[in-house]
Image: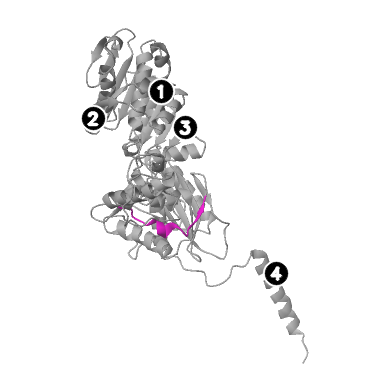
Amino acid sequence: MSIKEILADPVLFCSRLTIVDKRGRPCKLILRSEQIQIIEALAAGDDTLVLKARQIGSTTAVAAFFFWKWYTAKGPETYVSLSHKLASAKHILSIQQRFFESLPTALRRPLVVSNTTTITLADTGATLLAASAEGKGGLRSFTATGLHISEFAFTPRSDELKATAISALNGGQLCIESTANFWGDPLHKEIELWEAEIVGWNFLFFPWTDHTEYSTPPPEDFECDPDSMLSEGQQFWAAVMMGKLGETKFRREYPLSVDDAYAQTDGAWIEAEALKDLQVVKLETEGGPLCAVNHADRYAIGVDAGAGTGGDFSALVVLSATTGQPVDIRRSNRMSPSEWAEVVADASRKWKDAKVLVESNGTWGGVIITELKHSGVPLWKDAEGRDWITNAQSKPMMLECVKETISRGGLSILDSWTVGELRSFKVDDRGNPFCPRGGVHHGDTVIALALALQCLLKVSVPDRPFLPDWIIARRVSEAYKNAGKQQFRRY
């Protein structure tokens, strides 16, 4: 086979590169089927998203593909390895450096730059670059032809990183690959956008069962499940790995499906089992009503306030005093606090002058409370006439109320966005619940739900049925008629 044919085919080219094996010895890159699929997907030119299991070599495959693109470039193209830490990006560049240094002498073209963050060919000016989200080795002065983001699920400020990457690419090719981190993490967000057909990713997922090395012949005393879809060797290998990692970490790092990768994780605030009986309603991100107004009912509203600048959401949840169920859920991260106050006032009027609870100590809560007072909206007050204050004591208490209400079946319906927020919450080392930053969810609707539950404690259940005005008028008229008749009744 000629060199020209090898250079023209990324799979043939990459399979002749040299890597270092687990023992630190140089060896040829023997491409697995998963790695070939990744390279072929990238060769098609599509933006590619990879949810990977551990040790399938996806990072190496992507690094090899972009090395091939760099080596065969006709001009000063730039291919970037980007990670949330520069050390990780440098590691990927070091793999590519090894690819170059292991080429036959006749194919090692002169370099004009070669250091830990940049490799540039002298003849074409093509560059391999390592950059980070920390600002070191940044992208501001570069236009990238191709960009590789590794372990995206673990990236803080992922929206900013992705926006920077897309700006640097200017129409070039993007590849994101990562293992799962937690429900609602940055990678999960991209998968959900792909599933909703909002973003046109070429999405690749490889269950661990596709990896032939993940199988070990079981000993004679190992009890295999005859009904399992796994082979006996896969069952034993999985049992050993679960013993080492624990079931949760094993499922996250060696998933059988996307749902498996984002199954309940250690440190989760609420168990997935507690959510399984919820009726999950699909609404737009902005939310909406879950039922019509019942004039025989009373309602309570909890409100969480955001700045309206595209980050945290402002959210409101309306609960029925009769059923305890949510009847309306709204959220926006684009409305100013004053605009959001108008939405809250409208919701209160719609839901029969519902009482509203807004925390007063947040950055924007005071603004909303002032606006609602001017609008004449009934506001929650404590026994001493004070507004709600969220602090180190009240926040765990109100969130525990949410958890307890769900666990005992007190909430039977929620929208999918709020359920996603619930699944995103974790517990810190001191046992306090929190919503990790960097993911798709910020926990704002859960806070609004928690406040609504507290507000509901001060809303009494109606003790008499509601009658429309026309029925009341008719009964009054009939009463007058009957009263007149009684004056002339003979006995």
- The amino acid type of the residue labelled 1 equals Val
Query: Which region shows up in magenta?
Result: 266-281
Q: Quadrant of residue 223?
A: bottom left
Disc 2 designates what residue? Answer: 87
- The amino acid type of the residue labelled 3 equals Trp
Earlier sequence position, callout 4 versus callout 2: 2
- Whether the residues at callouts 4 and 2 have beta carbons within 8 Å, the answer is no
**Residue placed at 47% from the left, 51% from the top?**
375
Disc 4 designates what residue? Answer: 474
4 or 3: mark nearer the eye: 3
Earlier sequence position, callout 2 versus callout 1: 1
**Residue 456 against residue 248 in the figure, above or below:** below
Disc 1 designates what residue? Answer: 11
Query: In the visual, does 491 lie left or right of 275?
Result: right
The crowding category of the residue bearing disc 2, from other C-alpha atoms within 10 Å (few below 14, some 14 to 19, many at least 20), is: some
**Residue placed at 35% from the left, 17% from the top?**
70
The crowding category of the residue bearing disc 4, from other C-alpha atoms within 10 Å (few below 14, some 14 to 19, many at least 20), is: few
In x, y percent, where is residue 371? Answer: 42, 48
Mark 2 falls on what kind of element? helix
How far is the residue under mark 2 from the one under mark 1? 28 Å
How far is the residue under mark 4 from the one under mark 1? 84 Å
2 or 1: mark nearer the eye: 1
- Location of the N terminus by quadrant is top left
